[in-house]
Image: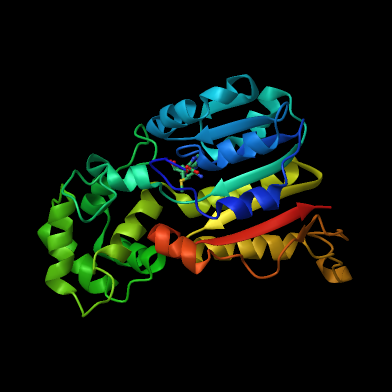
Amino acid sequence: MNLPHQPVLYQEIIHALQPHDGGRYVDGTLGAGGHARGILEACAPDGQLLGLDVDPQALALARKTLAPYEQRIHLVQASYTTLSMQLARLGWESVDGIVLDLGASSMQFDTPERGFSFQQDAPLDMRFDPLAPQTAADLVNTYSERELADLIYEYGEERDSRKIARAIVKARPLHTTRELVAVIESVSPRRGDRIHPATRTFQALRIAVNEELASIETVLPQAVAGLRSGGRLAVISFHSLEDRIVKDLFREQSKDVVNPPYEQLYETERKAIIKEVNRKPIMPSEEETKNNPRARSAKLRIAEKL
Ligand SMILES: C[S@@+](CC[C@H](N)C(=O)[O-])C[C@H]1O[C@@H](n2cnc3c(N)ncnc32)[C@H](O)[C@@H]1O
């Protein structure tokens, strides 16, 4: 597929959602529209798709990719955290399938001025939504040393978080990716063939700027609620923090809950709402990671509404 973002686990997503003619589907993270196109092809001639993305550049690109299906698509520049509202707007009570392909797209990493890449010099931005109030520069220049260290440790799982936070505070104000990379390299030098020392700090800032983990926690219950019985939710995550949220929610909602009497103040008996289609996450094949190194850390989890 000749797209600026190669859709990850493409066949697996189509297989997971099993789109059918007349079905209604949601792609909450449109990107370049690769997954959306596959879904629209598979649910032809009458299936429909609601596509969301907070990034207007992604939306413009997806609109082009999906032009042949114009009659069957509803594209909205909005966060997937507004899913319930978007479904209500269309008058869709329930849908047959939902895909969430989390994180950033190749277009975002490859557009230097967006500030996602530590390999290019650019303003420290990292917003998926260019109108969102807070940039990476805002965080880096206003958080306390302690807050920065916690953020880099928690969202970047970076062992050198304290050293890096101290160096940032000493060197600020910082305005560009190159300045930040230089600060990180000064206290956390390259070690052999390990990942670049700025990788984890950049990941942490991106997650914080876009409130990615909170967004996932917000959307998952809405997605489950929006599925018809037998409908499927497929989520691709790219690091353990995201995957843990998906895994925990799927586990929790796929269990019957019968609380002992003393806990009944909070919740009474509740039946499982979903079943996990695959207990272990699906990972890309060796061939896929060879052709698309960005697929390397992808994990796909699928749930089916009962
Ligand atoms: C990995 S890409 C998706 C690629 C897409 N599946 C494709 O085939 O091209 C993730 C996309 O999700 C978008 N995104 C991130 N957070 C979002 C949110 N809260 N709501 C909607 N879109 C979001 C990003 O802007 C990005 O375009």
Q: For this view, does 302 lie left or right of residue 103?
A: right
> What residue lies at 45% left-to-right and 30% top-to-bottom?
59
Q: Is residue 178 above or below residue 75?
A: below
Residue at 18 percent of width and 45 percent of height? 122
Q: What percent of the width, then of the height, locates residue 262?
A: 84, 70
Along the horizontal axis of the image, is 117 left or right of 153?
A: left
Is residue 92 toward the left or the right of residue 205 in the image? right
Q: Residue at x 55, y 27 (%)?
A: 75
Question: How far across and how far down the image is residue 200, in percent?
Answer: 32, 65
Asked if residue 44 is positioned above or below residue 1 in the image, the reply reads above
Residue 188 image-quadrant placement: bottom left
The residue nearer to you, when weighing 203 against 168, is 203
Foreground: 224 or 41?
41
Can you give x and y, in whole percent of width and height, for residue 227 in the image? 75, 43
Q: Nearer the viewer, residue 72 or 190?
A: 72
Residue 284 lies, in percent from the top left, at 53, 63
Asked if residue 29 shows in the view, the reply is no
Q: Is residue 44 above or below residue 29?
A: above
Residue at far bottom of view: 192
At x 23%, y 44%, the residue is: 112
